[in-house]
Image (cartoon, rainbow, N blue to C red):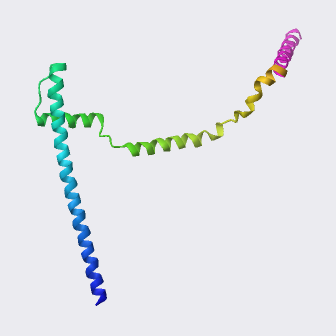
Amino acid sequence: METNQNIERHVEDTVKKSVKKGVKIFFFILLGIAIAFLVGYIVMRLWNWLMPHLFGLPQVTYWEAVGVLILAKIIFGFGGGGSHDNKKKSKKKEFFTNRCKSMRRDFSDWDHYDEFWKEEGEQAYKNYVERIKNNNHEEGGA
């Protein structure tokens, strides 16, 4: 008897959840249609307010405005890829970070370069140049 009640309760809960889900889906479909009509109306009003005065273009009807909106979406994209784009960017960044690890150098040793150059570098460079001149002179003279 208890199992029958449990089964009935489970079925009842499942039906309630399904009905709620169906109502939500229906509501969001209606909301999407309403928003689509509202956006078309806004595009029509903006076009008719701006374009004839700015560019001398004719006024458009509601359906022409919807057509212009759809054409613009096709040409310029539908957007809505914000999180997807972020994933692409992070993958690209990770790829280049891992790819360039072997080419990275530790530049902390360069902190002392100026001191070295003042103390030893200039004289070492002069010695190097002198050595090259002597080697070239000896090769040319031999």
User: Is residue 108 highlighted in magenta?
Assistant: no
Q: Residue at 72%, 34% (x, y): give it.
A: 108
Q: Could you say where residue 141 lies in the image, as x and y percent from the top left? A: 88, 9
Q: Which quadrant would residue 57 be assigned to in this image? A: top left
Residue at 30% in and 83% down: 6
Question: For the C terminus, which image quadrant?
Answer: top right
Question: Looking at the image, which residue is at 16% across and 43% down?
Answer: 37
91 vs 47: above or below: below
Left or right: residue 17 compared with residue 104 = left
**Residue 70 locus on image (x, y percent):** 21, 37
In the image, residue 39 above or below residue 21: above
Q: Is residue 126 left or right of residue 84?
A: right
The span picked out in magenta is: 120-142
Residue 58 figure quarter? top left
Q: Main secondary structure of the magenta part?
A: helix
Q: Is residue 51 above or below residue 33?
A: above
Q: Is residue 129 in the magenta section? A: yes
- Locate the N terminus by quadrant: bottom left
User: Looking at this view, is 33 or 128 the one in front?
Assistant: 33
Quarter where residue 139 is shown: top right
Question: Is 96 on the left or on the right of 14, as rendered?
Answer: right
